[in-house]
Structure formats: C-alpha cells, structure tokens
Amino acid sequence: MPLGFEVIEAIDSNMGLKIAKTENLDLIIVDLNMSGIDEHEILHQLREHSETQKMPLIASSANVFDHNHNKSLAAGANAFLPKPVDSKSLLNLLEQQLSINWIYQHAAAEKPHKNTDLSDKSAIKAGEFILPPQEILSHLYQLAMQGRIQTLRAKLNVLEEQSDEYALFLQTIHQLAREFKVEAIQKFIAQYLD
C-alpha cells in the first residue's frame, strides 16, 4: 500500500480488464506493453465499460514518441507516463488525476535523528554497523517489497526509539525512504538476509 494507496496488479490485459470491471478502483495505470489485448485496444475497452468510462486512465510505456503518446490519449487515456517511471512524475499525475493535495513533511519538522554521519559511506560498506535480528530484517524487507513506505518508516522510528545500536543501519533506510527509492531499500536490506 504505497503512500496509503491499495494497489492491485494484473499479469496481463485480460486480467486487467476483469479487475477493472469487478473492483472498485479510483484510477488505472495501463502498461501498454502488457501481453494480451492490443496495446491501445484495452484503453478503448475500458472507456466503453460503464464502470470505467469516467475513471482516470494513465497509459504507461517505454515508447515515448509523440505518436504513441497521442495514440494513447486518443484511445481514452487521460495522461501518459513514460517508462522508466519517475516517482515525481507519477506523484504529479496521481495528484492531478485524483484531485488530491500532497502534504509534505519538511526535513526540519522531522524527528531529529541520532548523530549518525551518513556521508561516511565507508562505514556502511565496511559493515561497521550493527544489524537488527533477522526477524526484524525480514519484516522490513517485506514492507519494502510491498511498497509500504509509510509503515516501513513508522517501524524504523519504533526501532530507533527502542535502541541506538541499529542507528546507522536504520538511518540509511530512512534516507532512501525519504527519496522514495524503494528498489534501493529492497536491495540494501536483501544483502543482509540469511
């Protein structure tokens, strides 16, 4: 549930259409390279179905040429999201299409962290920090894999309050989470899992 959104993923276009017609969705991001139905036909079908005809549709593709972008909009997409997906672009489109206003927490308003110098990458590379137990690492990894960044950050805060011994490790994850680098968090934690 990234940023509080519930995400349902389809493995192909046919499954995507079925989910769109049966689930109560607020927005659909269509991967135009998904197997199944012709890349723009799925947009036409979504626009023809009563449950999805007025729903915001975002087409996404690595093919960023103007003709593909225009064809997507003509087929029924409200917007186009180029791949690889840039988190700021995605957040901007979600804000526009769902009419939401993001509330940003400024760095100065965040809880002051322990005196941990994250610029000293050699300490991280040399493994000069104490790792939490495998059970905790596994839980943090699961949250990262699910994209549940808010929950992950809350868990990091709880761990920090419980003990200073994991501070450098936890601050590294905090820094990546503030930058929405979910894959980097996953890779960082994965390297320490048994």
Image (cartoon, grey):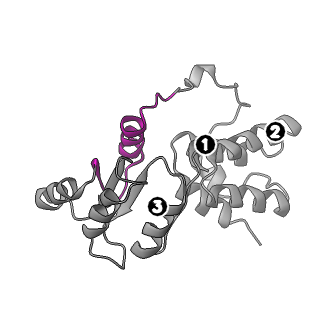
Q: Amino acid at mark 2?
A: Val
Q: Residues within 10 Å of mark 3 (few under 14, many from 20)?
A: many
Quarter of the figure with the C terminus: bottom right
| Label 2 secondary element | helix
Q: Is residue 132 toward the left or the right of residue 56 in the image?
A: right
Q: Which mark is residue 51?
A: none
Q: Amino acid at mark 3?
A: Ala
Q: Is residue 44 toward the left or the right of residue 102 in the image?
A: left
Residue occupying image coordinates x 60% and y 42%:
4
Quarter assignment of residue 177 = top right
| Tag 2–tag 3 contact (CB < 8 Å) | no
Q: Give the mark nearest the N terminus, 3 or 1.
A: 1
The one nearer the camera, 52 or 160, is 52
Q: Position of residue 114 (x, y in %)?
A: 74, 31
Q: Position of residue 52 (x, y in %)?
A: 40, 54
Q: Is residue 68 toward the left or the right of residue 184 in the image?
A: left
Q: Which residue is mark 3?
A: 20
Mark yes or no: residue 127 visible. no
The one nearer the camera, 121 or 78, is 78
Q: Is residue 127 above or below residue 120?
A: below
Q: Give the mark nearest the N terminus, 2 or 3.
A: 3
Q: Which residue is mark 1?
A: 4
Mark 2 or 3: the one toward you: 3
Q: Residues within 10 Å of mark 1 (few under 14, many from 20)?
A: few
Q: Is residue 95 toward the left or the right of residue 109 in the image?
A: left
Residue occupying image coordinates x 45% and y 68%:
16
Q: Is residue 88 on the magenta stretch?
A: yes
Which span is picked out in magenta?
78-102
Q: Which residue is mark 2?
A: 158
Marks 3/1: CA–CA distance: 20 Å
